[in-house]
Amino acid sequence: MLNGIDEIKGDVIRTVASLCAAAAVTAPKSGGQLFNKGKPLFIETVIVDDKETIGRLAEWIRARGKERRQEIWFRDAATAEKLDGVLFIGILENWYPPVYDCGACGFATCAEFMEAAKPLRKKSNFFEFVGPQCNLRNIDLGIAVGSAAKAASLYNVDTRCQTRIAIAARKLGIIQSEVAVALSMSITHKNVGFDKRMPAVDFDSAELGSLPATNTLPVKTEDGRWAHLPDHEPEE
């Protein structure tokens, strides 16, 4: 016999996260193209609800915050450690454009965009997400995340849409998506992401010096410049 929310919390998170994943996959998307001419599903959904993995994600977020010298990463790391679970929703490498030739990417046709994007996509694997991405597919991702968040709200599970923990999941190999959004989930008396203040961070402290490199670009140098790929000029 289970007594109290603490004992059933894990089952609730897993059940609701699964329903949210279903909502993400069935959400409307450009041309209804999730399966097209035998092509595989390109929306990825991954559920993480164990504290050890969530702890690894939080540690990576802190390490990335040190490299970027931005406090907001430390705020999100602290929030991550309080989560009961995370649903990652992303676009896998095998995505294809809807062939609308809409021009939103700056090219006249989808074929031109895909060809021109090839060299950039190879280089961008060093970055947090891979790009360029199709604008309409990014809209599809947003609709999928919104549908998942709505499903969670129907069962009164607190959620927040986040990208930094999704970046951590991609870099740690937890997800394979080129670009993703995380639906952070919690069952508490108050949403863990509500009124979180930005922490004060000493980026040059010995404590932060022990954080490992994330092997992700760009990184910010002590003089405030951004270091990019070797064949990119640093930003002034």
Image (cartoon, helix red, strand yellow):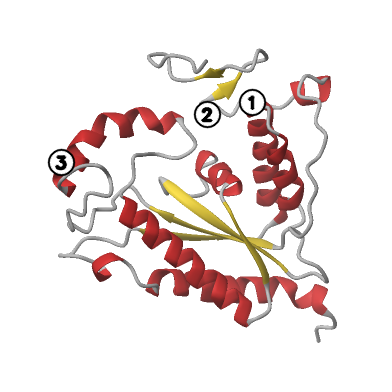
- 85 above or below 10? above
Bin the neighbour count of mark 3 within 10 Å (Cα to Cα): few under 14, some 14-19, many 20 and up.
few
Bin the neighbour count of mark 1 within 10 Å (Cα to Cα): few under 14, some 14-19, many 20 and up.
many
- Label 3 close to label 1 by CB (< 8 Å): no
**Of residues 116 and 95, the one drawn nearer to the viewer in this rendering:** 116
**Of residues 22 and 120, the one drawn nearer to the viewer in this rendering:** 120
What's under tag 1, amino acid-wise?
Glu
Residue underneath mark 3:
112
Mark-to-mark CA distance, 2 and 1: 9 Å
- Label 2 close to label 1 by CB (< 8 Å): yes
Q: Is residue 34 visible?
A: no
Closer to the chain start, of discs 3 and 1, is: 1
Residue 185 image point, x, y percent:
66, 64
- Please tell me which residue is depicted at 27% across the width and 49% down the height of the picture: 104
What's under tag 3, amino acid-wise?
Glu
What's under tag 2, amino acid-wise?
Thr
Relative to 30, 12 lies left or right: right
Residue 145 image point, x, y percent:
49, 64
Residue underneath mark 2:
216
Secondary structure type for disc 3: helix
**Res. 62 image quadrant:** top right
**Of residues 222 and 24, the one drawn nearer to the viewer in this rendering:** 222
Closer to the chain start, of discs 3 and 2, is: 3
Secondary structure type for disc 2: loop
* Disc ID at residue 67: 1
